[in-house]
Amino acid sequence: MNISTSATCTRCRQHEETFLHCVCDCKFSRNIWYHFNFNHSTFFYCLVPNDWLKDGLLGAHSFTFAAIVWWAWRHRNIMCLSQENWSLNRLIFNIQSMIETFKNCFSVNHNGANEERFTKWNDNNHSCVILNVDGSCLGSPPRAGYGGLLQNNAGYYLSEFSGYIHNSTVILYAELFAIYQGLLLAKENNVADLVCYSDSMHCINSIKGPTMKFHIYAVLVQDIKELFDHMNVTTCHTLREGNQCKDFLAKLVASLDIDFCHHAS
C-alpha cells in the first residue's frame, strides 16, 4: 500500500518484511516458535505462505500454530505501532491462554456423541465461603454492570452486591471489578477462606498469570492480588449456566444508575 517508505523489516532491519518474514522468519517471531519446539529446518524455509499456513493449521499442533501466528502478528504491531517490546514470557502466557481457549471451544467427545455436562454454583464442592461474580455490558451504546453473591458451602445466603459502572463499555473491566468488589465485601465480613467463581476465563488468567505492568487494567489486577494477601482465596472458572443468579443481577444493574448497592437479605 506504499504506506512505509521502505520494504525492510522495521524490527530486525535485515530483510524485506514479507508476511512469512513477519510472523515466522524475523528473529523476534522465531524465538517464539523455538520455545514451542517448532525448530525443524524445513519449517522456516517454505516460500509459499498459503502452503505454510495450510500445513500448520492441519497439523498435529494446529491450536498452538494458530495462536503463535496470531501473537507473532500482534507483537509485530505492538513493536511497530506502540514502540513496545514484550518479553518472551509475556507472549508465551498469552499464547498458552489462547491455546486453552481453542481447546475448550473445539474439543469433541472421542465417540462422537454429545456429552452431558452438569454444573452448579459451587461446582467443585468447596467447603468454605463461596463468592460468585459476574460482569455485563448491554445495550447500544453499551452499559456496564456487575454483581456478586456470598454463600456458605451449604448455600446459605450471606450477602449480595451489585452496581453500575460509569464510562466503561469493556466486559473485561466489568468482570474484574466484580471480583474486586466481592473481595472487598468478603474482607469486610471477616471471611478467612474464600473460593471465587467467575465465568470469564480471560479474567481469571489475568489474575493468576504473572504481573503485567503494561496491561490496561494492571492497577485493578494488582489491587485484586493485594486483597488475596488478606485472606485465603482460590479463583475458579465456572460455566455461565453455573453462574445464572449473578449473570441476571449484572444484566439487571447495567440498566440502572446505582454505583454500588449492598443487599443484606
Image: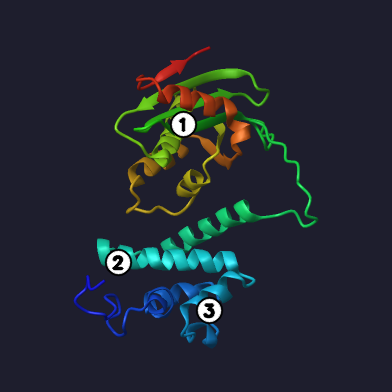
Q: Which residue is mark 1?
A: 183
Q: From what the image shows, is residue 71 above or below residue 53?
A: above
Relative depth, front residue between 23 and 120: 23
Position of 120 compared to 179: left or right? right
Q: Quadrant of residue 174?
A: top left
The residue indicated by pointer 2 is: 79
Return the disc, 2 or 3, that comes first in the chain's sequence.
3
Mark 1 neighbour class, 10 Å CA radius: few under 14, some 14 to 19, many 20 or more: many
| Residue 109 on image: x %, y % | 75, 53
Relative image position of residue 250 (x, y in whole percent)? 47, 27
Q: Is residue 37 visible?
A: yes
Q: Give the amino acid at mark 2.
A: Met
Name the residue furthest front.
1
What residue do we see at 31% from left, 83% from top?
A: 16
Give the amino acid at mark 1: Leu
Label 1 with label 2: CB-CB less than 8 Å:
no
Residue 252: x and y in percent read 46, 22
Residue beneath disc 3: 51
Q: How many marks?
A: 3
Mark 2–mark 3 contact, CB under 8 Å?
no
Q: Residue at x 52, y 66 (%)?
A: 66
- The residue at 59%/31% (across/down) is 243
Which SS class for mark 3?
Answer: helix
Distance between mark 1 and mark 2 Cα atoms: 36 Å
User: Of discs 3 and 1, which sits in the foreground?
Assistant: 3
Q: Residues within 10 Å of mark 3 (few under 14, many from 20)?
A: few
Residue at 35% x, 45% y: name it: 217
